[in-house]
Image: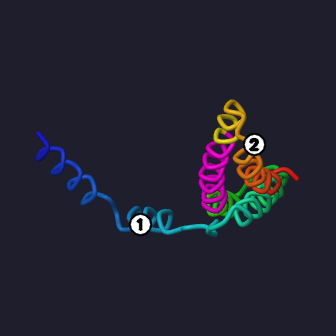
Amino acid sequence: MLGCFRLSVVLVLASMTPLALAEVERVAHFQGEPSHTLEEALENFSQGNAQLAEILAQGELDGSAIFAVHELTYTIENALEKLREELEDLAEVLEEVHVASERNDAETVQDRGEIYLETARKIIP
């Protein structure tokens, strides 16, 4: 069964015209701007959204505008992925503060609370 599926995929790919294959390659090669840090992610997210809004404000979108949106989404997706990771980490730190507060552990509340706030303030000052 798996062999039939693989053969089907090969046949479909073989039947594609060179132009269609070029389109697949062109679309697949974008990586977007990386977001290595929370600060980069916030900046890329903000700038990417501003650029997207600017493009959408044009009204009728031609092929080049659609292409620009397509390329831009890679940067925004990278930023969102980094933000998701950072928010998960932030939630874990907040949980440590929460549990420490239940245990009346002032030292952990103070230490981890400050770490929580340091990151949280980067997101919303």
Bounds of the magenta span? 74-94
Q: Give the residue drawn at x 74%, y 50%.
A: 116
**Res. 106 mark:** 2
Measured as percent of width and height from the top left, residue 121 is found at 83, 53
Q: Nearer the viewer, residue 74 or 94?
A: 94
- Crowdedness near tag 2: few (<14), some (14–19) or many (≥20) residues, C-alpha within 10 Å: some
Marks 2 and 1, how far apart in space? 65 Å
Residue at image mark 1: 19
Which residue occupies the foreground of this view, 86 or 66? 86
SS type, badge 1: helix
Depth check, front residue: 55 or 31: 31
Q: Residues within 10 Å of mark 1 (few under 14, many from 20)?
A: few
Colour scheme in the image?
A: rainbow
Seen at 62% across and 63% down, the residue is 71
Report x, y in % for residue 98. Answer: 69, 35
* 92 within the magenta span: yes
Tell me the kind of residue under disc 2.
Answer: Ala
Measured as percent of width and height from the top left, residue 87 is found at 66, 47
Task: Place residue 69 in its image quadrant.
Answer: bottom right
